[in-house]
Image (cartoon, rainbow, N blue to C red):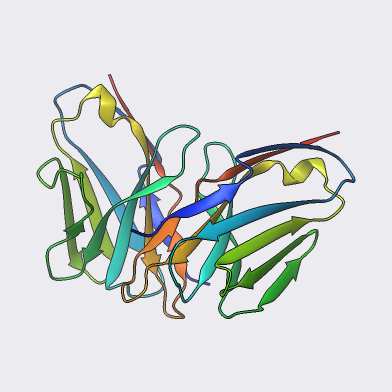
Amino acid sequence: GAVVSQHPSRVICKSGTSVKIECRSLDFQATTMFWYRQFPKQSLMLMATSNEGSKATYEQGVEKDKFLINHASLTLSTLTVTSAHPEDSSFYICSARDPIGGYTFGSGTRLTVV
Amino acid sequence: ELKVEQNPLFLSMQEGKNYTIYCNYSTTSDRLYWYRQDPGKSLESLFVLLSNGAVKQEGRLMASLDTKARLSTLHITAAVHDLSATYFCAVDIPGTYKYIFGTGTRLKVLA
């Protein structure tokens, strides 16, 4: 079946630094990927839709300059959290629309900003 | 704005008992999904429901969809401890590739 690899699984960074999270579709091409954020004991909130070869579409309230999304190839989308602050600490999950129209999720990235 | 609400939000049940989780959504949608999430983990796909009246079963879990009522149910039969997890439903936003998650139901099955 479709597999989405997300890396890293955990990252701890200092406040003010930037962190890049990668999301790769391993056995299929994904023109559309999604980035979600999940706070403890809460649901997943869609942050943005990543479109291969074009600009990402951000949800209302998500800062475009803070959460940079790049989808430069059909198998890779990256989310860069710029100038991270402790309030950015969260669980970030990507997903990709697979060839049969379903959604496959990455394993998630636990970001801790200290 | 599409809203997806689940009920209950928390559920503690004894092993061997049956229970149903409800997922209500506010606008028409083509598809409804159910996922399981274990603590600290990503999502595991359980069911995809594609049409009105669809029913799918896997082990002790059965999901159904009523598009007219904008309601899906996830029924648990004879619960076992291993089913303890958080369960999410999600629906497609019509005309887009996006989908929205429900509020989640945290299930704890007591031995």
Number of labelled discs?
0
Q: Residue A12, image x and y in percent?
A: 31, 27
Residue depicted at 68% across the width and 52% down the height:
B21
Q: Residue B70, image x and y in percent?
A: 55, 67
Residue depicted at 64% across the width and 43% down the height:
B8
The quadrant in which residue B82 appears is top right
Relative to A29, B76 lies left or right: right
Question: Could you tell me if residue B6 is visible in this image?
Answer: yes
Between B74 and A92, the residue placed more toward the observer is B74
Q: Quadrant of the N terminus of chain B?
A: bottom left
Q: Residue A16, image x and y in percent?
A: 14, 25
- Which residue in the rendered view is the most extreme toward the left? A65
Q: Residue B63, image x and y in percent?
A: 69, 65
Between A30 and B31, the residue placed more toward the observer is B31
Residue depicted at 60% across the width and 40% down the height:
B9
Q: Quadrant of the C terminus of chain B?
A: top right
Relative to A21, A63 lies left or right: left
Question: Could you tell me if residue A13 is visible in this image?
Answer: no
- Which residue in the rendered view is the most extreme toward the right? B16
- Which residue in the rendered view is the most extreme toward the front? B69
In the image, residue B87 above or below residue B53: above
Residue depicted at 42% across the width and 47% down the height:
A44
